[in-house]
Image: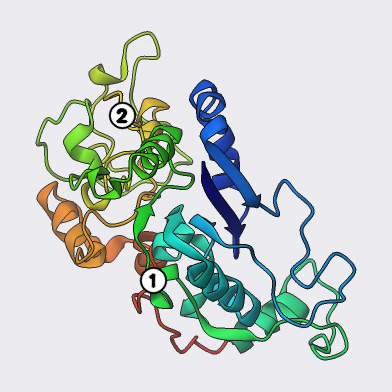
Amino acid sequence: MARIIEEWLNSCSGCEIAILNIGDVLVDLLPSLQFVHIPVLIDKKYYGQTGEGKTLEIPEADVAIVSGGVKNEEHLEVLEMCRKRANILVALGTCATDGGIPALGNMYGNQAIRDFSYRESPTTVPGPDPDTETYHIPAMLENCGALDDHVKVDIKLPGCPPHPDWIAAAVLALLDGKPENLKLPERSVCDTCPTIRERKKGGELKRMLQTPEFDPEKPVSEMRCLLEQGFMCLGPVTRAGCSGLKGEAPRCISTRMPCRGCYGPIKEDSKPLMDYVGALASVGYDPARMLDRKGFLCRFNGAHGVLHAVKQPKQK
């Protein structure tokens, strides 16, 4: 019986839903698993059920599965306790492995985020920053980081959310005592994409306000490559795996949408910002015509020091 901790930090619960989407395989695995801490499903207070505790309480476990990135002091405290209490720590989802969407905030800095949230948003009645001491709001860290920016991570399962196949494979590898057997692909989405590449040059970059050229009566394998059609598909710089273990077409591509980059960089040392410039140039597009290059290309991998606060131009 494997004891499991599951925690969520700066996240949306999509990764926890992906765990449930394992389906029948999860039902078969449940007799071998004991979830001793999973706040998304079970009411579990950190400082005792009535707040009587003085220290953070998380039970010991064989495995800690943690989703979400680390943006405030509470996230960091919970993560460090999960690392301390578990033998193996699994980073679940792209927020945990690479920062995810929340790490886009690294381009602005905390004060700019507070200014927009409490005063500058078109739908917000302007007001002061909340009193963090009165309302016990955890202090923000300088950046939104991935788990391994702070602690040792044993297994990374990227994706927004990860495919249930990979979660099931990770659990099975852990139950077998062989986590090293879990091998994520080190290929790009393009390597697994069935669309037609004509190698034609030129054209204008397009937004998805336009409809790609395809015949809805025909399979995706008979659609022309979306990047060659001018849509900024991130397949060339994104890790494959979103379709699971069955070898199907990448999930976004199968719905006739460009890859959005949610599985993160192909390898740990990949540089999507640089690599995508080459990909665009190879099909005749001018990278300088891209809007918000950093935000677009790093929208799922802004941790690990990739995105930094930049000086925003003063509005006239």
From what the image shows, is residue 163 above or below residue 273? above
Question: Which residue is label 2 attached to?
Answer: 245
Q: Can you tell which quarter of the image residue 173 is in?
A: top left
Instruction: Specify whether 23 is left or right of 52.
Output: left
First of labels 2, 1 by sequence position: 1
Q: Quadrant of the C terminus?
A: bottom right
Q: Secondary structure at mark 1?
A: helix
| Rendering colour mode | rainbow
Where residue 291 sits in the image (x, y, percent)?
38, 63
* Label at residue 148: 1
Where residue 259 sits in the image (x, y, percent)?
35, 42
Q: Residue at x 79, y 53 (%)?
A: 43
Q: Residue at x 62, y 84 (%)?
A: 140
From what the image shows, is residue 127 above or below residue 195? below
Q: Nearer the viewer, residue 315 or 12?
A: 12
Q: Nearer the viewer, residue 220 or 89?
A: 89
Q: Residues within 10 Å of mark 2 (few under 14, many from 20)?
A: few
Visible residue check, residue 55? yes
From what the image shows, is residue 93 above or below residue 246? below
